[in-house]
Amino acid sequence: MSRTDDHQKSCRLTQAVQGELKREYESDLVGQLRGSGNTITRGEITIRLAEAFGFCWGVDRAVSAAHEARRRFPDRQIWITNEIIHNPLVNEKLRKLAIKFVDISQDGYKDFSEISASHVVIVPAFGASVQEMQLLEQIGCQIVDTTCPWVSRVWQRVNKYKQQGFTAIIHGKYKHEETVATASRAENYLIIQNLDEAEWVCSYILGSSSKKEFLRKFTLAYSHGFDPDLHLNRLGITNQTTMLKGETERIGALFQQTLLKRYGQDSLSQHFLSPGDTICDATQERQDAMIKLVAENLDLILVIGGYNSSNTGHLFDIAAGISLPSYHIDGQSCIGPGNRISHKSVGKPAEQTTEPWLPAGTLTIGITSGASTPDQVVAGVIENIFAIRAGR
Ligand code: SF4
């Protein structure tokens, strides 16, 4: 086949996949909303959508690559090393394309034993650890790597820390695939989940706690052989791309001040490397839009996205920070039947049900969705809300 034939085939594939993605994930209702100031009113209910919400560029790219892989390799077994993104509907649609997910045990062990050289393996937008990539290369399967370039950017930073002999302080969740993949690229690392943990570590640096206590408190969050008395002397900050930007900045500033106190201004550059900007644009835009939305005159707030989606969780943290009823739901089926909502609340790990949740009278409802939530899900939620009021 000539290169031109190849190119034409590839263009046809891309067009076909674009049509498929439009059908599967987009929504006319949300399209209209985007074109009319992100507001829709029916009867007594007004919906205000955040200025930026839903699928980000990196997720769009990963989902397209998965659909395209199915068309390119119609007869081959396709695997994904993890959920391609944290959205139940998207992952369900991929299962319907006969794409299998690699089994993961409770303790995070992945079973690659069924993958063979003739199979195709998709690496999700969060990326994969160095060890997983090596294993896949040894198997000799076809790898479709959809790692988001924003994630790769963090890896470059961690690599720089490694080359310069700095420990990577990673602001993230130690079980999250992206953070696992990032940590695997560091020589020495410590994963910090939030400002409280950062304060604890900074107090340790200034001599407040015992090593034993440190190692117990951060078990599972540091590199093999980590010694806090040796490895907290030269620190570079980085993060999971979907954390709250303001928190990463505060954590970075705290470590900077701590090392300044300990080593003095003249040698600070030998002990501290600042984080740079590694929160991705999409996360930032959605967080900024959420901060703007919650400042409006709303009656309640809905945040839509997978319960295990980090960026959705942080949008919900913003909503939960104000005194309005706010609900994190993972899809259309969370609304109803009747005036019922199944949702998560801050500080409560399990899903709960609230009934009735939609008060009577005129209401303005603010809605946003995480970077892995298709527009069709947002549209379904809006339709279900209108249906409650219509008594359907
Ligand atoms: S949220 Fe950001 S880092 Fe994650 S896939 Fe989207 S663009 Fe990439």
Image (spheres, rainbow, N blue to C red):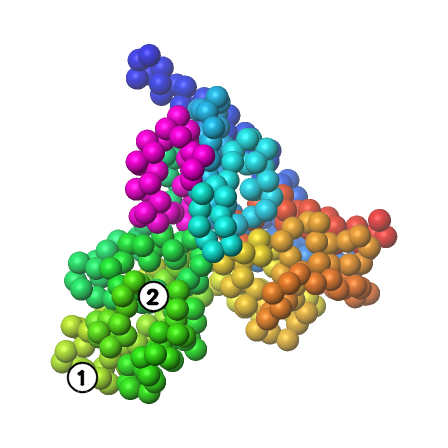
Q: Which of marks 2 and 1 is nearer the N terminus?
A: 2
Query: Closer to the camera, 264 or 163?
Result: 163
Query: Closer to the camera, 155 or 266?
Result: 155
The answer to whether residue 51 of the structure is visible from this angle is no
What residue would you read off at disc 1? 264
Identify the magenta region.
112-141
Q: Is residue 72 left or right of residue 32?
A: left
Q: Is residue 93 left or right of residue 298?
A: left
Q: In which quarter of the image is residue 241?
A: bottom left
- Which amino acid type corresponds to the residue marked 1 in the rendered image? Gly
Residue 62 at what x, y percent from top left?
44, 40
Give SS at disc 1.
loop
* Label 2 crowd (10 A; few <14 / some 14-19 / many >=20): many
* Furthest-left residue in this view: 266
* Label 1 crowd (10 A; few <14 / some 14-19 / many >=20): few
* Furthest-right residue in this view: 391
Q: Is mark 2 within 8 Å of ligand 1?
A: no
- Residue 253 higher or lower than 65, as above or below: below
- Residue 213 higher or lower than 67, as above or below: below
Residue 208 at what x, y percent from top left?
33, 87
- Which amino acid type corresponds to the residue marked 2 in the rendered image? Tyr
Q: Is residue 62 left or right of residue 323?
A: left
- Residue 304 higher or lower than 133, as above or below: below
Query: Closer to the camera, 114 or 14?
Result: 114
**Residue in view at x 33 percent, y 12 percent:** 1
What residue would you read off at disc 2? 222
- From the image, state whether disc 2 or disc 1 is nearer to you: 2
